[in-house]
Amino acid sequence: EEAKKKNLKVGVGLQRHHQIGYIETIKRLHDGAIGDILAARCYWNDGGVWVKERQPNQTEMEYQMRNWYYFVWIGGDHIVEQHIHNLDVINWVKNDFPIRCHGIGGRQVRTGKQYGEIFDHHAVEFEYADGSRCFSQCQHTRGTWSSVSEHVIGSKGLCDVGGFRITGPNAWQWKQRNNPNPYQVEHDDLFDAIRNDKPYNEAVRGAMSTLTAIMGRDATYSGKLIERDAVLNSPIERRPSAYTWDATPPSLPDKDGFYPVAIPGTTIVV
């Protein structure tokens, strides 16, 4: 709302909204191609990412900044940093955001101190206001089944959203090749809005899909049923007191170099 008042143009990096295959597929879903959306599932199951080794004379703040992926206050855990893209697609399909969720997760494979404080797997069931569910998985485990995808089940058919394919009475497949790169298109769209003063504000969707992912993380960290409003109004503060290289981050290693990791059933998140 503040951005609108100031006539600011806001892009948030959820590039699937600028990818022609997703746009055409979801337009058909919104037009009723598979009927009412009854359930959904989405995945970001893959092998994980880089680690930056600790360097001599590096402050704790600099080490965490260089390894931002593994610290909740910066990266949010991979359910927030990566899996948000899949969760956002389901929110887009639903034209809504979940009201509550519950889930399980943990740290089974990436247990070394170099992996900071995040989990290596999350599985969450999200509930929308109409009672429909999204079943979500994300993991970082090498050598296991890999999928980065979104799927929805309707009263009249099915859709592989990221595969741009609908099955059922209104079967359809996006077959156009050499589509524009959505990472470039999202910049083109933003720059066009700035240069030509067009309305352009993705802030609400970006914030609410981020909140969706944070809800999922809080559900797996705590092992509790998590309500959206409780997370939105949580008094818990994760930011550092200052943003300087010598400031103290909110999470610190113990004497052996290991960081505190959430324990379901014990950890308090809201």
Image (tube, grey):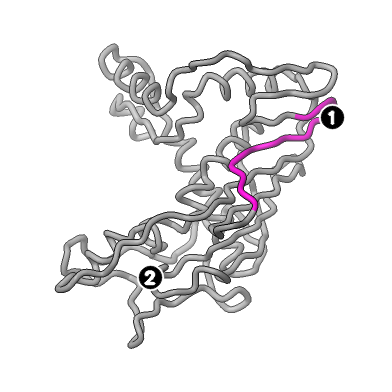
Say which residue appears at 39% left-offset and 35% top-offset: 12
**Left or right of 219 in this view: 41:** right
Question: Is residue 165 within the magenta segment?
Answer: no
Marks 1 and 2 sit apart, C-alpha to C-alpha, by 46 Å
Give the farthest residue toward the bottom: 255
Residue type at mark 1 is: Ser
- Image quadrant where residue 103 sits: bottom right
Quarter of the N terminus within the rendering: top left
- For the residues labelled 1 and 2, say whether their Cβ atoms are less than 8 Å apart: no
Say which residue appears at 84% left-offset and 29% top-offset: 155
* Range covered by the magenta-colored residues: 145-158
Crowdedness near tag 2: few (<14), some (14–19) or many (≥20) residues, C-alpha within 10 Å = some
**Left or right of 51 in this view: 266:** right
Give the farthest residue toward the front: 143
Q: Tell me where residue 133 appears, x and y as whole percent.
A: 73, 45
**In front of the other: label 1 or label 2?**
2
State the residue position of label 1.
Answer: 155
- Residue 114 tag number: 2
- Image quadrant where residue 52 sits: bottom left
Question: Above or below — where is 143 with respect to 42?
Answer: below
**Left or right of 211 in this view: 124:** right
> In terms of secondary structure, where does tag 2 sit?
helix
Residue type at mark 2 is: Gln
